[in-house]
Image: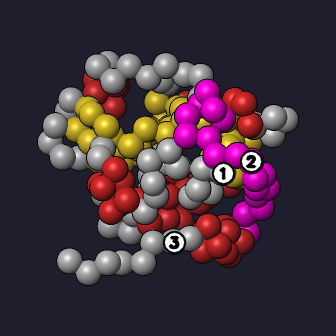
Amino acid sequence: MSERKMATEEDLMAFLAELGIETTTTNHPPAFTVEQGNAVWGDIPGVHCKNLFLKDAKGKLWLVVAPGERRIDLKALPKQIGSARLSFGSADLLREVLGVEPGSVTPFALINDREGRVSVVLDGWMMRQDLLNYHPLRNDATTTIAAEDFRKFLRATGHVPEIVEL
């Protein structure tokens, strides 16, 4: 199997610029969890989010994106999104499909899902907010993007998200 080149943070920023999307990126100590993020996000405006890379019992891949404090019930989620039973995708699968390391999962990594293997689920409340925050392919920075620009980014990557009240 040949290794395909995954986008870097620089590639991501260039892609966003090509789309006419303005973002602000703030560097901070690495944050592997929402709890660690709360300690380093400081006064970065907008909704801070968590990203769950999941695989269902039929092998379908999912990226569920929600506000950091939102509790996601993995037992109830399949009924909400129409999936089979869900579990977390492995670190190797995450690297293969999205090109990021565990602890750096971000919807910006969809730039690397050129085959459209990942189904995207976004929290409805989150998508009604003005500003959203995600890792820029690494967990020692946070990139702030307007929700409408985030939708534009997803369309440009070929992903049509399902908006769900999680």
Place residue 153 in its image quadrant: bottom right
Which one is closest to the eye, mark 2 or mark 3? Answer: 2
Q: Is residue 61 left or right of residue 150?
A: left
Give the x, y percent position of residue 32: 55, 40
Say what amino acid the circle numbered 1 marks.
Asp
Label 3 vs label 1: CA separation? 17 Å
Identify the residue at horizontal 30%, vertical 44% (top origin): 89
Badge 2 is on which residue? 28
- Dot 1 and dot 2 residues touching (CB under 8 Å): yes
Identify the residue at horizontal 49%, vertical 24% (top origin): 165
First in sequence, mark 3 or 1: give its number.
3
Say what amino acid the circle numbered 2 marks.
His
Checking the image for residue 7, the label placed there is 3
Q: Quick one: which residue is furthest to the left in this view?
A: 58
Front residue of 70 and 81: 70
Give the x, y percent position of residue 46: 76, 37
Say what amino acid the circle numbered 3 marks.
Ala
| Residue 129 sits inside the magenta stretch | no
Element under disc 1: loop
Badge 1 is on which residue? 140
Label 2 vs label 3: CA separation? 21 Å
Residue 133 can be seen in this image: yes
Identify the residue at horizontal 62%, vertical 41% (top origin): 31
- Dot 2 and dot 3 residues touching (CB under 8 Å): no
Front residue of 112 and 30: 30
